[in-house]
Amino acid sequence: LEKALRLLNSNEETPKRTFVLESCRAYDISLHANNVYRHNFLNNNGNESSSSSDKVCTKLVEQLGPSDVAPCRANLWTMSPPCQPFTTNGEGRGKERLDEEDNRCNGLKGICRLLNETETKPQWIFLENVRGFAESNMRQRVCECLTENGYSYQSFVLSPVELGIPNHRKRYYLLAEKSEQQKVINNLPILHNLTSLSDYERIAKQPLHTIGRYMDEQTTTDDNAPNHDQYIVPDKVLAKVWFKGLGFVSDKDTATHCFTAGYGRIYHRSTGSLLLMKGSPADVDRGGVSLRDLPLDRSDMTIYHNQLRRFTPEELLKIFGFVDCGEIGEMRVFEIPTTVVPSLEQRYKLIGNSISVNVVTELLHELLLSA
């Protein structure tokens, strides 16, 4: 939101007014997530003060009532509900999606109830979820609630690669605005793509960056480079037959698999790509050619001893847009320090469960343009 407001304030085509983020309130039941929120966004070194209008609340969304949200008089509600009810493996491979019957939809049902009951409704609503949400009964339920409460809405399915970010993370987005002249811009499962955005020309000119832009190392022989020992794939894993089928990239490539919450826990193609370390023997032998153009020899993966590793949490924060790499100017420092979340696996889980900040920035910019 901060990045979107910066875009709006610098846009010469928008009315000459300044958008200011006055206050925020976050609700989450993850203690790790809330500690990260406090560390990055609250004053006094992460400690909430009684005078602060920004709050972090550990509470189930379905437990919220009108008296909880009315004092905030929020202009914008944003949400990213649990995705498991809308994924093919939400209850195990081969199982059907539970959709609105899943208890993890209770929070979103609570939002619909809250929207019906509260008198101080937000001007805008922003929702993000997996693509499977687009064809779900729960989405239909949300859209009916929006219509009943006088909102116009528009749907998108976008991936960071469409904005020049080397990561496949296709997600569903719903943008809603309260309007006296209500209209449903798009109520079909077949959704808008990037060309629907008002600012398409600027976005389309963004080049597809290489992965090297987001790496926090120079070469494996650089004495000043971070220590990546804990991220290197162990030899016993290299020797597994199934390891040959995973996704591998180098700093010269322009795409990675979607990184998920399980990236730090298991090695699997569905959890994210592994990196061929820059300056490693296999990388030097390639002469600067990407793995897409010259794939790895997978006949014996043990030859890549100490040459393949996971992306670090810091690199993923850059790819996800939490740490700026020049796409939308300067922004605040964002971090997940070990003092806040000691477990490496939990840091990976937080990032994998989060959002693509750069995609959300562009869509929030689109949503707020009408102001």
Image (spheres, grey):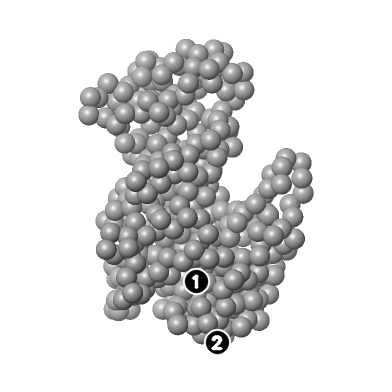
Residue at 32%, 70% (x, y): give it. 49
Determine crowd level at label 2: few under 14, some 14-19, many 20+ residues with C-alpha closer than 10 A: few
Residue at 23%, 24% (x, y): give it. 223
Determine crowd level at label 1: few under 14, some 14-19, many 20+ residues with C-alpha closer than 10 A: some
Residue 355 visible somewhere in the drawing: no
Where is residue 324 shown, x and y percent of the image?
32, 51
- Residue 279 in the image: above or below residue 154: above
Q: How far separated are the C-alphas under marks 1 and 2?
A: 14 Å
Mark 1 vs mark 2: which is more N-terminal?
A: 1
Name the disc covering residue 331, or none: none
Q: Nearer the viewer, residue 306 or 269?
A: 306
State the quadrant of the C terminus: bottom left
State the quadrant of the N terminus: bottom left
Whether label 1 touches label 2, CB < 8 Å: no
Residue at 52%, 82% (x, y): give it. 67
Looking at the rendered structure, the secondary structure element under dot 2 is loop
Task: Identify which amino acid the numbered label 1 is placed on.
Answer: Trp
Residue at 34%, 67% (x, y): give it. 48
Name the disc covering residue 119, or none: 2
Q: Residue furthest left?
A: 224
Looking at the rendered structure, the secondary structure element under dot 1 is strand
Residue 45 picture quarter: bottom left
Task: Identify which amino acid the numbered label 2 is placed on.
Answer: Glu
- Residue 347 in the image: above or below residue 8: above
- Residue 10 in the image: above or below residue 115: above
Count of numbered circles on the image: 2
Where is residue 23 shown, x and y percent of the image?
37, 73
Name the disc covering residue 77, or none: 1
25 left or right, relative to 80: left
